Image (cartoon, rainbow, N blue to C red):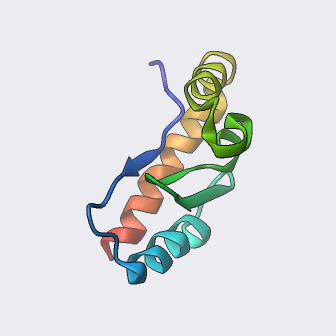
Amino acid sequence: MYFQVPFVAWRFETPHDELREIFDSAARTAPTNAEWTFTSRRNWMIAPSRLIEKAGPGGALFNEAALSITTSDQEFCAAASEDLEAILRELAV
């Protein structure tokens, strides 16, 4: 099986500030193998902190960073995929 570095992103037409804390809390408190970050810029995103950091300021290198992690670290991608499932379960509660 081939894993891609996981993340979830969306854009609200009208963002609701109370949702920021819910998403941030889920990214911080769900049981995970890696550190995760919630960002709320133009797109809202929950992603491994490693991906956010490697993407650079403003996420200019996001696609390149995702490809680099995916091709070089399948173990990380598999563990992060499990993490995302835990984060989504946390959000479902």
The correct choice, above or below, for 84 with respect to 93 in the image is above
Task: Tell me where residue 40 appears, x and y as whole percent.
Answer: 51, 62
Nearest the eye: 16 or 76? 16
Q: Position of residue 12 (x, y in %)?
A: 30, 61
Residue nearest the viewer, comparing 64 with 27? 64
Which x, y percent locates residue 10? 35, 51
**Viewer-nearest residue: 57 or 82:** 57
Residue depicted at x 49% and y 79%: 21
- Residue 21 in the figure: left or right of residue 13: right
Q: Quadrant of the C terminus?
A: bottom left
> Residue 22: x, y in percent?
44, 77
| Camera-side residue of 51 and 79 | 51
Which residue occupies 58% across, 28% down?
Answer: 66
Residue ID at (42%, 70%): 90
82 relative to 12 in the view: left or right? right
Write down the quadrant of residue 16 in the picture: bottom left
Is 40 situated above or below 9?
Answer: below
